[in-house]
Image: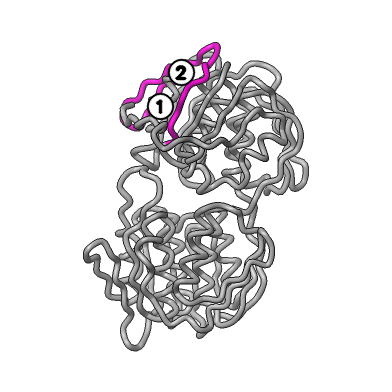
Amino acid sequence: MQKYVINGKKPLYGTVEISGAKNAAVAILPAALLVDGVCRIENIPQISDVTLILRILQELGADVRLINKNTVQIDSTHINRYHVPEKLSRQMRASYYFIGALLGRFGEAVVSMPGGCDLGTRPIDLHIKSFQSLGASVNVVAGYVRASAPEEGLKGTSIYLDQASVGATMNAMLAASTAHGLTIIENAAKEPHIVDLANFLNAMGADIMGAGTDVIRIRGVRELHGGTYSIIPDQIEAGTYMAAVAAVGGDVIIKNVIPKHLDCISAKLMEMGVHVEEMGDAVRVRRMGELRRINVRTMPYPGFPTDMQPQIAACLCLANGTSMVNEGIWENRYRYVSEFRRMGARIQVDGKVAVIEGVDRLMGATLCACDLRAGAAMVIAGLAAEGTTEISRIHYIERGYEKLVEKFQGLGADIKLVEQPDDETRPHSRAV
């Protein structure tokens, strides 16, 4: 067991480089199953979710070779299995992308229900509805999703998503890429990682148009060929460092970003009094004065992302006045609130609304990360707090952030990774 130990109140200065997008990588890597040949994927983040997916690909029979720390070569030519090992797939939510990829490749898929962070119920009914619209038979039995295509294969169709679900949109794209005929996905999600998946598939020979809009058209092809592709920068990792500068103060250049993807985050930080300047493929974030209160509502892209809600809340704990946060996506996003209260934060939660009354200071405390983004928010709070903060259960954080300790140390933060005896982990309270 390991934990983070943070001595706070040190403003951040310098430059940090953003890694490849987690939410793109966890769909693009399973998509390699559709490729008849070798594909080389660059700018993959060094995070535990990516390691799990690469292990699943190897278990299925793919030849997976790490070219360097951020580049992998995958050859799925000789894969002949479509049953994803339960022990691996239950450790992450994104395991459900193997359903669409395997269904498109073999016409068969057996994958356990997704795991990952506990943000509430994770129904996959829209995924199942999409597969069924393409002609597949889908059953959920004993915790497994079992999908099979008819003998003649999947057939293009019209799919209307009742909600603009990112996962269902991407899974439908995977399955439809090699289906017979034209598939039209209406009310599709528009997030940057959906566009990235479409660009990857197109680079391998798929025919997908409209990704990034609410209507995506996919004309199925017989097979995909090998090629090389580089994953986009991580919007949420970049936003996390932006929020850290806002909470702690300082002047940081955040490199390897697509500023357009950050507009929704930049707008809220500027509303709080933070200076954000676009610099080509970088943004400069400065905060010298006090933070102002704001209201935030999470929405699908291009709205404010739910994956940035805990991080912005950490900033608002120190803002002048009373802020309101309305969570429009997940029901369990406020599990971090009890941890923030241990630091002196004043937060009241009523359903999906959190009312945050800014305080003069936070105090270091012993915390437990309860999910990926909440854990990142606790790091931000610890960096801004007086005294020492210790954060355990950091495996949640390592699911989505590459070299977080090293990157913050490079900005002048006093943060380190230390060994923690197993009996030292504090039971986590779910009360908010």
Task: Give coordinates of residue 339: x percent, y percent.
Answer: 42, 26
* 388, above or below 310, in the image: above
Label 2, on which residue? 345
At 51% across and 13% down in the image, what residue appears?
Answer: 359
Looking at the rendered structure, the secondary structure element under dot 2 is loop
Earlier sequence position, callout 1 versus callout 2? 1
Side of 179 where 386 appears, left or right: right
| Span shown in magenta | 346-369
At 36% across and 44% down in the image, what residue appears?
Answer: 118
Task: Give coordinates of residue 259: x percent, y percent.
Answer: 68, 45
At 43% across and 77% down in the image, what residue appears?
Answer: 104
Asked whether disc 1 touches disc 2, contact meaning CB atoms under 8 Å apart, the reply is: yes
Label 1, on which residue? 337
Side of 141 where 51 appears, left or right: right
* 228, above or below 400, in the image: below
Q: Give amino acid for label 1.
A: Val
